[in-house]
Amino acid sequence: MQELENSTVNVYSSEKYAYNEQKYRFQSYDIVEINIKTTSPELNEIFSIISGEAGSTSMNMSQNGGDVFFMNGYTLNEEGIVELPLLGEMKLIGLTTEEAKTLIEKKVQVYVPDDGFFVRIRLGGIRFSALGEFNAPGKQTILQSRVTIFEALAAAGDLTTIAKRDEIILLRQYPDGSQIHKINLNDRNLLGSEFYFLKTNDVLYAEPLKVRELGAGTNFIQTLALITSTVSTIALILTIVR
């Protein structure tokens, strides 16, 4: 016990990097979850269609690992508009979740005075695509309100051993178009950048190292072994022929 009390643990801690997280603004084809509760049972019956409480679909999808938000949420159309029962069409494109909540509350106030209602709206998870040198590439959905780029890598099975970790391509959509960014995962300043948190519809592409051009091995050692084996086989054949 005395030895444990006198022992020291060597721990290295870097400086703290402040988050540079920008509030997400809804885009076309986003999926949103909208829940409305009021003091009126009749209105609750109508608004239950919005929240997907009319059946057990949410429970079944959750148990089976499906995308609950896709089944019960609302997808913004090309113009960023959703149509809700009783409330009609609302344009949410370009709004934050707080601004969209305020807009819906103003619509609900027409039917429920004295603040006898509750409104919740949130983005239906973070959807992104992982292409290239990932162990599990493809379209991914993480049912969280915010996702770091490292959580995204983990969801895609991490990078392969021949991926360029210092040149990850990030294709990000903006209200006025798309833009390509190059990210260095080894740069600690990434923690304080706007690219530390993924946004829905982001596309990650991992390029392979030049070693991929040398052979079919998944890393340099396997490629070298493949080349050595091939050369040895050719040498043996030439020896037999002679």
Image (cartoon, grey):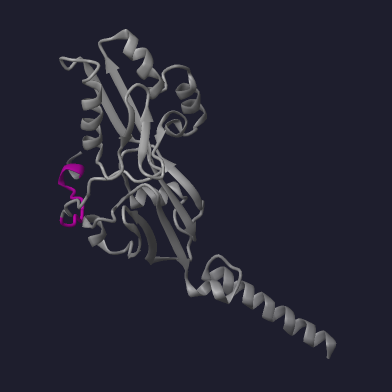
Residue projecting furthest to the right: 241
Q: Is residue 116 above or below residue 103?
A: above
Q: Work out whether residue 99 or residue 61 is closer to the camera in this orientation and state it.
A: 99
Q: Is residue 200 above or below residue 164?
A: above
Q: Is residue 60 above or below residue 206?
A: above
* Residue positioned 44% across, 62% down in the render: 206
Q: Is residue 107 left or right of residue 129?
A: left
What count of labels does the image hold? Answer: 0
For residue 124, say whether it is visible.
no
Quadrant into which the C terminus falls: bottom right
Quadrant into which the N terminus falls: top left
Residue 188 location (% of width, % of height): 25, 61
Residue projecting furthest to the top: 41
Q: Is residue 149 above or below residue 225?
A: above
Q: Is residue 140 left or right of residue 237?
A: left
Q: Work out whether residue 26 or residue 141 is closer to the camera in this orientation and state it.
A: 26
* Residue positioned 47% across, 17% down in the render: 55
Range of residues picked out in magenta = 4-15
Q: Is residue 81 magenta?
A: no
Residue projecting furthest to the bottom: 242
Q: Main secondary structure of the magenta part?
A: loop
Q: Quadrant of residue 10?
A: bottom left
* Residue positioned 37% across, 44% down in the render: 79
Q: Is residue 191 left or right of residue 231?
A: left
Residue 25 location (% of width, % of height): 27, 45
Residue 87 location (% of width, % of height): 32, 25
